[in-house]
Amino acid sequence: MKEVARQHFWWPQISKQIEELARSCSGCRKYGKKPSPAPLCPWPYSRRPMERVHIDYCEYRGKMLLVMVDSFSKFFWCHVMNHDTTASKTLAVLFGWFCCRGFPTTLVSDNGPQFTSKEFAEKMSKWGIKHLLTPPYHPASNGLAERAVGTIKSHLKRMDCPVIPLELYVNLHSILYWHNASPQSSTDQTPFELMAKASVPRLFPQLQRPQKKTQEENRSVLPKNKVKLFQPGDQVLVYSNHTKLNSPGTVKEIKSNNSYIVFS
């Protein structure tokens, strides 16, 4: 557009004004191409076991499995949930894991209905856990849990494990045992060894938690010049994965370095 205009006309700031005209075109804004993905924002490096854990659900031959992984040690947990993936059952399993290894500072999950429920939020607050939800349609944001799910399902398929309760239980815990006893390429140590560095669970963990939370929140690894940052009130375009169209919106809340709540 600018090249064609410059072949016939010229005036001061012609290129800038043509760009502003194109940006103000409602049709161009609505049917514009999907924006390029924002640069990945790496999670802060965990300095101790149970500082941050990632959880996710997966399906194996009709049975639902709840998977959790510790970001520091890469220690895996997995529980056969069968068909009960409600918030109550999920919280019951997580509470059992936390009582054995200590309550985490931060828990990361996707936007599944059990994780976004009021009951789940209330328990996270009561247990002193900061619950972070990954952006919708961005499974890479919970990549640690996704890789854990892939590892467990891959081994179950290679073993051709049936869903008979005893067979599934034994094979699943064998996979967890061998993974947690194997040195990891990222740490050169086994998850068992790194998890042993965790402090002894305390009767009143929240008394020691506020300072640790602040330390984690203050660690930022996102280069400020690699991604455009927005502030509440900024006008933006929102791309819909359902309609494949853009629509105008207003930034209402900043959730993280590259995640925002926008009202259309």
Image (tube, grey):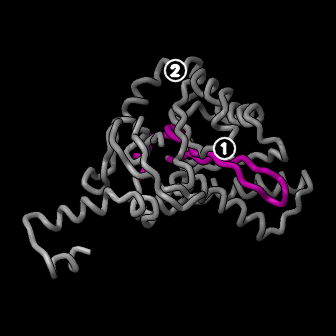
| Residue 231 among those drawn in magenta | no
Near-viewer residue (58 or 239): 239
Q: Residues within 10 Å of mark 2 (few under 14, many from 20)?
A: some
What residue appears at the point 76 percent right and 50 percent down from the top-left corner? 65
Secondary structure state at the residue bearing disc 1: loop
Q: Is residue 6 above or below residue 197?
A: below
| Residue extending furthest toward the front | 8
Query: In the rendering, which numbered label is found on residue 206?
Result: 2
| Residue extending furthest toward the bottom | 7
Near-viewer residue (221 or 69): 221
What residue appears at the point 53 percent right and 46 percent down from the top-left corner? 134
Identity of the amino acid at label 1? Gly
| Residue 46 among those drawn in magenta | yes
Circles 2, 1 touching at the beta carbon (< 8 Å): no
Q: Is residue 91 above or below residue 167?
A: above
Q: Position of residue 136 (x, y in %)?
A: 56, 50
Q: Position of residue 148 (x, y in %)?
A: 62, 56
- Residue 47 can be seen, yes or no: no
Query: In the rendering, which numbered label is found on residue 112?
Result: 1
What residue appears at the point 59 percent right and 44 percent down from the top-left corner? 109
Q: N-terminal of the two: label 2 or label 1? A: 1
Quarter of the image for residue 167 reads bottom right
Distance (Cα) linking label 2 and label 1: 27 Å
**In front: label 2 or label 1:** 1
Query: In the rendering, which numbered label is found on residue 147?
Result: none
Residue 95 located left or right of residue 214: right
Q: Position of residue 149 (x, y in %)?
A: 66, 57
Secondary structure state at the residue bearing disc 2: helix
Q: Over which residues does the magenta segment extend?
A: 42-71
Which quarter of the image is occupied by the N terminus? bottom left
Q: Is residue 6 above or below residue 89?
A: below
Q: Position of residue 155 (x, y in %)?
A: 73, 65
